[in-house]
Image (cartoon, rainbow, N blue to C red):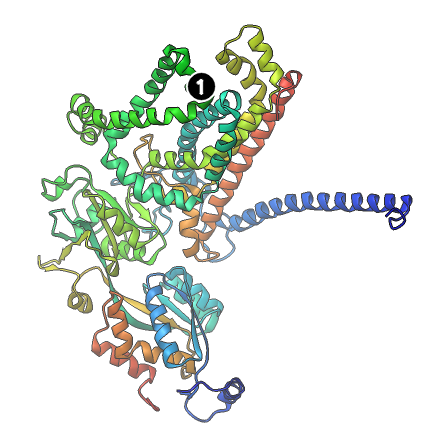
Amino acid sequence: MPAAPRHCLVFWLLLAPLSVLPAQAQEVAGTLGTMGSDTMAGLMLRWGEALTRQYPGIRLQLQASGSASAPPALVAGTTRLGPMSRPMNEAELQAFIERHGYPPRELAVARDALVVVVHRHNPLESLERPELDAIFSDSRRCGAGEGVHRWQQLGLDRPAGRIRLHGRNAASGTHGLFRQLGLCDGYFRPEVNEHPGSAAVVAAVAEDPRAIGYAGLNHLTPGVKALALRDADGKRHLPDPEAVQRGDYALSRNLYLYLNLPPGESLPAAERAFLDMVLSPDGQSIVEELGFVALLERRRLHQRRELGLDEAGR
Amino acid sequence: MTDTSPPLFVRRRLRQGRDRLATVLVTAGGIGVILALLAIGVFLVVEVVPLFWATGATQVVSPETLWSPLAGGDDSVGHRWDPTASLVEGESPRVSLVPLAWGTLEAAAWALLIAVPLALGAASHSALFMSSRLRSHLKPTLELMEALPGVVIGFVAGLVLAPWVERHLADVLAMLLLLVPGLLLAGSLWSCLPPRLQQVMPLGWAGLWLLPWLLLMVVVAQALSPWLEAWAFDGDLRHWLEARLGLDIAVRNAMIVGMAMGFAVMPSVYALAEDALSGVPRSLAEGAQALGATRWQTLWRVVLPAASPGIFSAVMIGAGRAVGETMIVLMASGNAALMTWNPLDGLRSLAATIAIELPEAGPGGPHYRLLLLAALLLFVFTFLVNTLAELVRTRLRRRYRRLGGGA
């Protein structure tokens, strides 16, 4: 698609609101401001690049300072697209509805999982959720009898000594999600070393045979081993793509895009182009390239239909 | 040339005008700084107040929860910092600032414990004994050290030093045990040397010819450490510490933070203390030595007291930097909000907590205000340190003014 001269673009933009044509403009242009999850920063960046290749007039602006920064930005109206690595909580939804009068549109755009990692030489292979909880929390809401402080308590003869805990900083999406899924909303032990990034957690575990930590799925390195989780029937589930897609692996989640879209209105052109790309097979292959897991096909097509992406034109 | 310059009264006028302008600018600058400081304080207070007296949906935190320990069931007693915890009905919020304040002070204390003796020793040596040529090279080098960004130091400390120390704990212990006696030994060996050799290795150049000796000590310590570990610690120091003393070792711990931050604080303490020491009039030291005092007596009884106001403010500046330092603590401490006396445990400081959590705390929410309260506390800490420093400094300066002592 050849780039149009600038005056032509301005003309199109002026014309757009009057246009009786459906919103899919031939020359989509503008800046898409987004604010939110740092887990999704790489993903948004690659999607943005793909979008700019498709429509040279569009730029995706990215501010990735954590999932919790998306709802305030959506409420204040500084952005219309908020990537979040967890669903909005009740308070955030209420704040949005109070301001705008309608709930934000929630889209699942990829699957992600948390992995529990140990040093590559650690003999441990799998854990039950209560055990995981007993290792990381001092509240044990998932039903474990007593706290697990030493490797011996897990029936291992090595490594010797206390378990050293590593995790993400409070207020990161990963921290919140692990609290919710891994600790049954309990309390972390104060001994957990809090790192400012998943890569730092994995690096810390990779250098210490006595360490255990949790991190995002796409941060696995050869230095660490991802543990399988046993479900209630004692079946082991490794964090492989199928188990994550279906949700059999207990620590898996959706990655979301939240959209400020008044009910009944159709998507603005730039957002439409972006979501069309995200929910296309190409967009989902970018998801896989970055180490996340693609959506189930059924879910992807369902969301496309809901947004009306397959109607007019494309 | 003379005919082009303006007449005398014009020049005087001009000069007066410039003087007045400069006075106004300097005064305005001073007032501006004070106003900015006040504004920051007022901003923090205004932002924090709704935490205690809310006028809306924000959750109110009672002051006691900030200072008093939890008396929960299970394992979770004591002070807890877990501001994003989802609370069960009837539980008090886990937002005690005590472990953070503790971590800040503990980290600063370790840093000063490491930096101050080294910096003051170096400053005394270079101000009084070192040859001026060596000193003219050494001082700028040390000041260059000060320019190293905290992130870099923290990165090296957290990712390289910490795992190395954890694996080579016995080596580190052996080095600590060997270095001080080794240096004393070097001193006494030197005084036994024949005068010709002493001339080749003069005291003023000790900084250079001691380097191979120090390297030798490090090598000896490494060679001795397995033997030391086998003899005194049943073959495994880490295991011994845990079994005998109940000390649990974290890879990133207060010692590592102390070392890294000590390294960061040392150059500024050194530079200020060195200035203060070399500001002491030569006549004082020479007089003392003429009366028969040894070098040590001169340093300890005459020069150090005379320079004490400057040295004290050097240490206090170091303390202020150590309390406020963020990146080193963030990367080297493990950020575990613990309260223990064990220097091999992790810690968590106020500044690191603010840096790590503020970007993700929603503005206006209780978590955000709690972090601003932490910032206020940090502000008060540094303010107190600086005020105390200034008070003691003026006190000391008045006392030693008769001696003509420095800075």
Residue nearer the viewer, B56 or A278:
A278
The answer to whether residue A35 is seen in the rendering is: yes
Residue nearer the viewer, A251 or B127:
B127
The answer to whether residue B315 is seen in the rendering is: no
A304 relative to B288, above or below: below
Classify residue B334 by image quadrant: top left
Tally the marks: 1
The quarter in which the C terminus of chain A is drawn is bottom left
Q: Farthest top residue? A: B292
The residue beneath circle 1 is B202
**Mark 1 belongs to which amino acid?**
Pro
Residue nearer the viewer, B206 or B222:
B206
On the image, the x and y values in percent for residue A156 come to 10, 42
Q: Is residue A268 left or right of residue B3?
A: left
Q: Is residue B374 left or right of residue B180?
A: right
Q: Farthest front residue? A: B196
B55 relative to B376, above or below: below
Residue drawn at x 38%, y 11% is B194
Q: Is residue B199 left or right of residue A303?
A: right
On the image, the x and y values in percent for residue A246 come to 17, 69
On the image, the x and y values in percent for residue B70 come to 34, 39
Classify residue B311 by image quadrant: top right
Q: In terms of secondary structure, where does tag 1 sit? A: loop
Residue drawn at x 48%, y 56% is B364
On the image, the x and y values in percent for residue A180 come to 27, 56
Label 1 lies in what chain? Answer: B
B115 relative to B51, above or below: above
